[in-house]
Amino acid sequence: MTNNMKQRNFIIAIAIAFTSSIFGQNTFTLTSNNLGGEATINEEFNGFGCTGKNQSPQLSWKNAPKETKSFAITMYDPDAPTGSGWWHWVVFDIPKNSTELPSGAGNKGSSTIPQGAIQSITDYGVPGYGGPCPPEGHGLHQYIITVYALKTDKLGLNADTNPAVVGYYLWNNTIAKASIVTYYQRKKV
């Protein structure tokens, strides 16, 4: 066997070992029990012309990296006609032993949000969950719900922190993230 063949076989063996170690691991995933069929959100915001119950979806996650110290969750609409999208939910400092938020956990005054978790302001201007409310006839909007596994137990922010600042801190502290993309459209009446 020539040196080039030995070197090539060594590189292939390393690549296989590396691939096995990456793909053999369980994947960090996010799921929801109550998002509608075909990944649709059925419950809209109550305000801005919308009349829904504004109930945050149930969310579950599993297989977070071992070094995770806390979690954060965001819900973002990139299709909002604002030039910068619309932040519907920003919650962080979720304890590392959490694996689920029940339906309604993001609602103001909910007792089901994990103790110590902080819900900061959204683009509606208030903390907590704010459901879909796109302009009538604007078409289908996508809502990206993301759970972040973080390398810090606290971001050092509060409920008055805007989504852009929270996003910056998330970007600097994320180990892994998992998302669900869901859809909603408000028909023209």
Image (cartoon, rainbow, N blue to C red):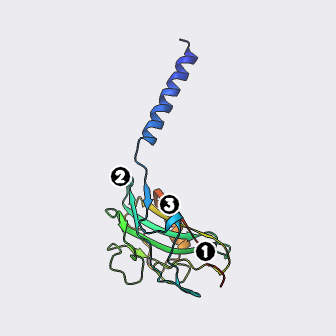
Q: What element carries label 1?
A: loop
Residue 76 lies in what quarter of the image? Answer: bottom right
Give the amino acid type for the residue marked by disc 1 in the picture: Gln
Disc 2 to disc 3, C-alpha distance = 19 Å
Tell whether label 3 touches label 2 (CB within 8 Å). Answer: no
Tell whether label 3 touches label 1 (CB within 8 Å). Answer: no
Q: Mark 1 points at which residue?
A: 185
Q: Nearest to the eye among marks 2 and 1: give it.
A: 1
Give the amino acid type for the residue marked by disc 2 in the picture: Lys
User: Is 38 displayed left or right of 115 in the figure?
Assistant: right
Q: Mark 3 points at which residue?
A: 179
Which residue occupies 50% across, 24% down? 10
Give the amino acid type for the residue marked by disc 3 in the picture: Ser
Q: Name the residue under label 2.
A: 66
**Looking at the picture, how far across and down is residue 6, in whole percent?**
52, 18
User: Is 30 displayed left or right of 79 in the figure?
Assistant: left
Which residue occupies 45% across, 61% down? 148
Q: Nearest to the eye among marks 2 and 3: give it.
A: 3
**Looking at the picture, how far across and down is residue 50, in whole percent?**
56, 85
**Looking at the picture, how far across and down is residue 115, in whole percent?**
32, 74
